[in-house]
């Protein structure tokens, strides 16, 4: 099956789904608390389900209820330091966050745990953890550096030297567990930390659960041992990385009102507001909502080292802007759910964009409109959603193969697209 989109502008109001990044963190913090926590305003995307199921594998009990706006609240009966593997195999599906956040939790228990995955997750680099295992004497086996990964051994307090230019998920994974160890630990950055905003989110969530981390200007992190997570009720704010698609659709074809955003958020992807405005986009900001108004955009140079998830949708806006845009410091996108630099270049060029790849970025010459035709999602949620926004400025219908990729992070995306007056239909492509 595929989705066919009839080109037309999107208009209306959308309630932005809760942050996937914060949901992962709050659910894990609840599981590491000793007692009952309530995580409110959660959407059970495939990635969030993977994290919930992983924690259940350590004996954590959860009760999930749906509220009146089709969101969920999760009651978590945390086990604190007494987690232990109830099941020896954890399927992380395609969630990099689940894999990299849960590996240190498995090492906290000291038990034997095998991690499996699917798609590109099997190949996502884990060398930072392998180096840590070697230093600490934690036994592990893998398939030529890839999943499945089996580990057995106990994590100990230490100085952890970590590269900052691969993924901030390794730092977050350690930050969850190190406070529970018997002694103090340090995480020392060997290279400058990219995606600082994600580490900020982790430290903020930990603080809400009573755990404190000392951040020394992102060059090192000092973590006292023998801390305890305090059960709490936590409400997950709206997701700027998902809002970015609708804000882009708004300035390309709107107006669109995005509700449910924390305008003081620590999310790095809040930077989409600054980027749109710098490109000439008109935004009306205030009172937990942002209205994006159809605008004429201009190209610019954009450093995406701190905001890699925004690159696909920025590329769509840039391709429809006047002049040239250069996207820099985006090399890590080649090891995401797809090679996102290649994927967005290939698919947008199919429909009339003018994009050239660099090793770590893109050069984009703006055009007035896209043509239309058939494109592929590369089984990547952010590529699928970016292409859906591109359809608003196509001359002819756009068919997106692999549209179900959105379930990874935003299962209601197509429903919301329709609510914004988008005209979509399913097509049987004979596959």
Image (cartoon, rainbow, N blue to C red):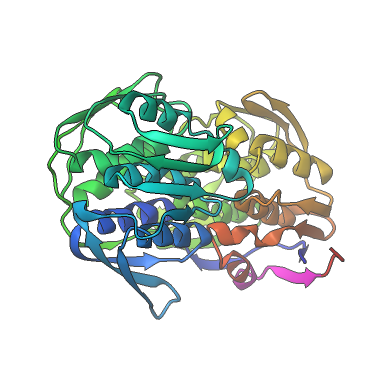
> Going 28% across and 47% down the picture, which residue do you hit?
109
On whether residue 421 falls in the magenta region, the answer is yes
Q: In the shown orientation, is residue 410 left or right of residue 173? A: right
> Going 48% across and 34% down the picture, which residue do you hit?
126
Q: In the shown orientation, is residue 424 left or right of residue 250? A: right
Would residue 330 be visible to someone looking at this image? Answer: no
Residue 390 at x, y percent in the picture: 71, 51
Task: Indicate the quadrant where residue 343 lies.
Answer: top right
Residue 97 at x, y percent in the picture: 45, 47
Task: Indicate the quadrant where residue 8 lies.
Answer: bottom right
Position of residue 230 relative to residue 326, above or below, is: below
Residue 10 at x, y percent in the picture: 65, 63
Q: In the shown orientation, is residue 1 left or right of residue 308? A: right
Q: In the shown orientation, is residue 58 left or right of residue 129? A: left
On whether residue 401 falls in the magenta region, the answer is no
Position of residue 289 relative to residue 327, above or below, is: below
Position of residue 403 relative to residue 304, above or below, is: below
Query: Which residues, given as a range, are shown in magenta?
Result: 417-427
Of 105 and 391, nearer the camera is 105
Q: Quadrant of the N terminus?
A: bottom right
Of 41 and 130, nearer the camera is 130
Position of residue 40 relative to residue 217, above or below, is: below
Of 122 and 328, nearer the camera is 122
């Amino acid at each position: 099956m595929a989705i066919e989109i009839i080109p037309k502008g999107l208009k209306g109001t959308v309630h932005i789904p809760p942050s996937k990044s914060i949901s992962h963190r709050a659910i894990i913090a609840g599981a590491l608390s000793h007692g009952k926590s309530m995580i409110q305003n959660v959407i059970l995307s495939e990635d969030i389900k993977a994290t919930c199921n992983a924690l259940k594998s350590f004996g954590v009990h959860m009760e999930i209820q749906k509220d009146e706006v089709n969101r969920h609240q999760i009651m978590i009966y945390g086990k604190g330091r007494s987690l232990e593997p109830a099941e020896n195999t954890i399927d992380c599906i395609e969630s990099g966050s689940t894999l990299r956040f849960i590996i240190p939790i498995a090492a906290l228990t000291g038990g034997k745990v095998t991690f499996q995955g699917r798609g590109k997750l099997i190949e996502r680099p884990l060398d930072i953890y392998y180096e840590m295992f070697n230093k600490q004497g934690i036994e592990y086996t893998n398939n030529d550096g890839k999943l499945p990964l089996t580990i057995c051994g106990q994590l100990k307090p230490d100085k952890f030297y970590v590269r900052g230019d691969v993924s901030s998920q390794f730092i977050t994974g350690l930050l969850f567990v190190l406070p529970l160890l018997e002694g103090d630990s340090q995480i020392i950055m060997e290279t400058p930390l990219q995606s600082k905003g994600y580490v900020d989110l982790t430290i903020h969530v930990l603080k809400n659960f009573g755990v404190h981390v000392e951040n020394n200007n992102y060059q090192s992190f000092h973590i006292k041992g023998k801390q305890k997570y305090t059960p709490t009720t936590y409400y997950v704010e709206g997701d700027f990385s998902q809002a970015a698609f609708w804000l882009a659709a708004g300035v390309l074809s709107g107006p669109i009102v995005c509700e449910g955003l924390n305008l003081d958020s620590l999310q790095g992807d809040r930077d989409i507001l600054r980027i749109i405005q710098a490109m000439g986009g008109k935004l009306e900001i205030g009172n937990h909502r942002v209205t994006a108004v159809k605008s004429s955009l201009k190209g610019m140079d954009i450093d995406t080292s701190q905001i890699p998830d925004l690159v696909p949708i920025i590329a769509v806006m840039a391709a429809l802007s006047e002049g040239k845009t250069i996207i820099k410091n985006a090399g890590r996108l080649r090891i995401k759910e797809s090679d996102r630099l290649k994927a967005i270049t290939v698919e947008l060029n199919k429909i009339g964009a003018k994009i050239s790849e660099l090793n770590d970025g893109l050069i984009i010459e703006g055009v007035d409109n896209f043509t239309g035709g058939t494109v592929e999602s590369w089984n990547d949620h952010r590529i699928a959603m970016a292409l859906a926004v591109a359809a608003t400025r196509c001359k002819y219908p756009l068919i997106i193969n692999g549209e179900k990729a959105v379930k990874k992070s935003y299962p209601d995306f197509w429903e919301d697209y329709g609510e914004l007056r988008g005209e979509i239909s399913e097509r049987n492509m004979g596959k």
